[in-house]
Structure formats: structure tokens, C-alpha cells
Amino acid sequence: MKTTTRLMAVLLLACSALAMALDLDSAKSQGLVGEQPNGYLGVVKATPDAVELAADINAKRRAAYEAIAKKNGATLDQVAILAGQKAIEKTALGTYVKTPDGQWVKK
Amino acid sequence: MKPVWLVALLPLAACTPRVALEAPKDPITINLNVKIDHEIRLKVEKDVDKLITEDRTLF
């Protein structure tokens, strides 16, 4: 019984991680969210799901940037902006990216 | 007549290098800062690349 519960917990965790990856990719391909030069995910179409997803991912990104900044003696902004450049470079064609003057355009 | 002119110019020629010797002080400090910034940038870039390619749930 205990093993079954554990197995179910592991499965649930695996599923939620998978669902998260799907969510970000599909949210991007549906044009709900896009990459911004500041290193954080921006909301293009403000559906409740998109807003929640962006907030969740941005909190995790911020923590990751903070760790990199601390490790290398850089500031959070330096890391975030560098990550923004790279994320825009690497994001798929046809998804939205924000230009430095604040316009959403399709890559 | 000509050698007299050359003697008059000698002190000027001697002065010029002395001024030039003091000049490098500032550029050296600036170069050092640029080098440190560059090193930090390279390290951060490596970590950011790793984060973006490895953490598929965040990017």
C-alpha cells in the first residue's frame, strides 16, 4: 500500500513536470506568451492561464538568475539581460518576442 | 649658424618623453576593469547557456 502511494506520487510529479513543459511550449506557439529582452517571459494575450504560467516561470527564472549572479559576482540584471538575449535567440520561429522598444513581433 | 638652432631645440626634445611617461597610468586601470568584466561575462554566459539548454521547463 505504501509503495503504491509512493509510486503514484512519483507519477504525479513526473506528469506535472511534463505538463509544465507542454504548457510553456504550447503557450508560446499559441501566441499567449513570448520572450522579452529583460530575461523574463511576457504575456502577449492575457488569459488567466497565461498570466499564471508566466508568473510561475518568471519566479523560477529569477531564482536561477540569482544563483548564477551570486556564483559569478555579477548583478541579477546583468544575468537576466544576458539570458533575455539568449532566450530570444533560441526561441522557436513563429513565437512572439518583444523588441527593445516594447513591441511584440513574431520571430 | 645651424648647430646653434639644434642646441636650442634640445631641451624641448628632452621634455616631451617625460610627459608621455605619466600617461599610461589611467589606461592600465581601465584595461584591467574591462578584463574583469569580460571574465565575469564569459562565466555568466556559460551558466546561462547551460540553464537555457538544460532547463526545458523554464525556457
Image (cartoon, rainbow, N blue to C red):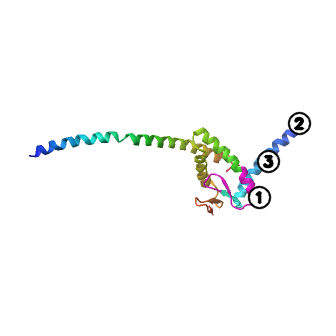
Q: Is residue A13 left or right of residue A70?
A: right
**Which residue in the structure is indicated by mark 2?**
A2
The residue at the point 76 percent across, 47 percent down is A17
Dot 3 and dot 1 residues touching (CB under 8 Å)? no
Question: What amino acid type is highlighted by mark number 1?
Answer: Pro
**Which residue in the structure is indicated by mark 1?**
A48
The residue at the point 87 percent across, 37 percent down is A3
The percent position of residue A11, horizontal first and vertical second, equals 82, 44
Binning the other alpha carbons within 10 Å of mark 1 as few (below 14), some (14 to 19) or many (20 upward) gives few
Q: Secondary structure at mark 2?
A: helix
- CA distance for labels 2 and 3: 20 Å
Residue nearest the observer in this picture, A40 or A87:
A40
Q: Nearer the viewer, mark 3 or mark 1?
A: 1
**Which residue in the structure is indicated by mark 3?**
A15
* The residue stretch that appears in magenta: A35-56
Please check the rendered image and state whether residue A93 is part of the magenta-colored stretch, yes or no.
no
